[in-house]
Image (cartoon, rainbow, N blue to C red):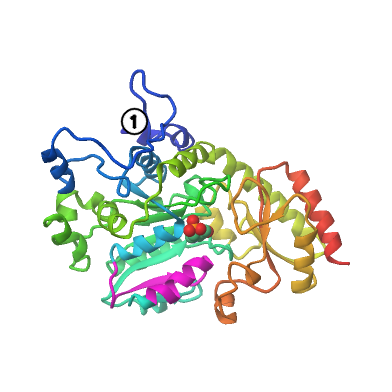
Amino acid sequence: MSESKNYKIETKCVQSGYTPANGEPRVLPIYQSTTYKYDSSTHLGDLFDLKAPGHMYSRISNPTVDAVEKKIADMEGGTGAVLTSSGQAANLLAILNITSAGQNIISMSSIYGGTINLFAVTLKRLGIEVRFVTPQMSDEEVASHIDENTRMFFGETIANPALVVFDIERYAKIAHDHGIPLVVDNTFATPILCRPFEFGADIVIHSTTKYMDGHAQVVGGVVVDGGRFDWTKGDKFKELTTPDESYHGVVYTKDFGVENAYFTKLRVQLIRDFGTPLAPMPAYLLNIGLETLALRMERHCSNALTVAKYLEQSDKVAWVNYPKLEGNSEYALAEKYLPLGACGVISFGVKGGRDAAVKFMDSLKMATIVVHVADARTSVLHPASTTHRQLTDEQLVDAGITPELVRFSVGIENVEDIIADIEQALEASQK
Ligand SMILES: *Cc1c(COP(=O)(O)O)cnc(C)c1O
């Protein structure tokens, strides 16, 4: 493991997490077992008390899952990672790990629709308030939302689907000035395009369902611990710094070190209690996706930029949003945080509003309508009538979505075929 920490990101994609010993399988095996065998009940007792490392039950950990967690932690530059059954579970557990009823978190308003539902409806029912802020607010205005019960600051590196780029350094400073961690959902950027820990983030989350898997095969999520936030400063994070009664008084920051406290607690307490692990087979498939992530992201980015430039000059397109287009409101932030590219997702408005947008989508031949994004195959979605349909008009505007917005997820096919498909569908949209 220590050696792989020094590898470049492309090498980590392939090599990190699993290193077979002499005569062992070259490819990460699928440990399709819920249980593990022990020579003595004393040893098992030590596992239950977290005194010895090892696996006891696959709801909490499993060797296949463990290898993929180590790979992702390595790729992000974190101290540890916990895979979850979905990106939604990753977001939920990342918050509940350090936030309880009566407390609150701060979130950027431009975020994934599913996360808005979780924040604005379900967390509220659990007694956790989410306070939304926008990039237009001054630092002082943002800070005015933080009080002694605030537990974290949340944003998405590239917001899905508004494609607003998160100014990680700016908000890391505000968060740290107030003694709270910055939590970044890095799903769209992936660690290939941006590693938020390098800009001061403390916790990174992914829906691995998207680019990390990349083949639309397995729903999954991950929470990665940057290991640098000092939970012992101040007395906010008592759940990490005082005894956990459900483990005979383990103190996470003391017994596992400040750098491992957050992800250890998330696994042994929250995955244990809520029961949202990733299973071995999906972890195995995810790992295959990760091996080619660097190559795929390169192609997604170059294809998307070419498509965005094509759309920009088309007289059948009202507007194009892609952070790497010069003149885009996010261009400067994208240059800073996403030097290699801004992923494969473009949003644009077809001239003629909602009806023309629907006609365009229905006329595509290669690109398909799916409730998914960030797939190797080019795909397309109309958020206002699908993923974001439960939002109010006001929430839609806050999330940066208009009725004619088409979310176009550029795949890794030959870009000429993608543009030819768009061209004929745009033609049809105006009839
Ligand atoms: C898809 C997505 C999620 C939710 O992930 P699932 O794996 O679908 O549960 C969370 N955040 C972002 C940015 C996403 O794109």
Above or below, 203 against 33 in this view is below
Residue identifier under label 1: 3
Location of the N terminus by quadrant is top left
- Give the magenta-colored segment's residue range: 99-124
Q: Amino acid at mark 1?
A: Glu
375, 139: nearer the viewer = 375
Rendered location of residue 316, percent (x, y): 82, 64
Check residue 110 for magenta coloring. yes
Q: Residue at x 44, y 70 (%)?
A: 118
Rendered location of residue 376, percent (x, y): 62, 45
Res. 327 image quadrant: bottom right
Above or below, 318 against 296 in this view is below
Rendered location of residue 342, percent (x, y): 58, 53
Q: Secondary structure at mark 1?
A: loop
Q: Residue at x 18, y 67 (%)?
A: 234
Question: What is the residue that sits farthest to the right in this orientation?
Answer: 431
Q: Say few, some or many: other residues with alpha carbon within 10 Å of mark 1 (under 14 / 14 to 19 / 20 or more).
A: few
Tell me if residue 244 can be seen.
no
Above or below, 292 against 355 in this view is above
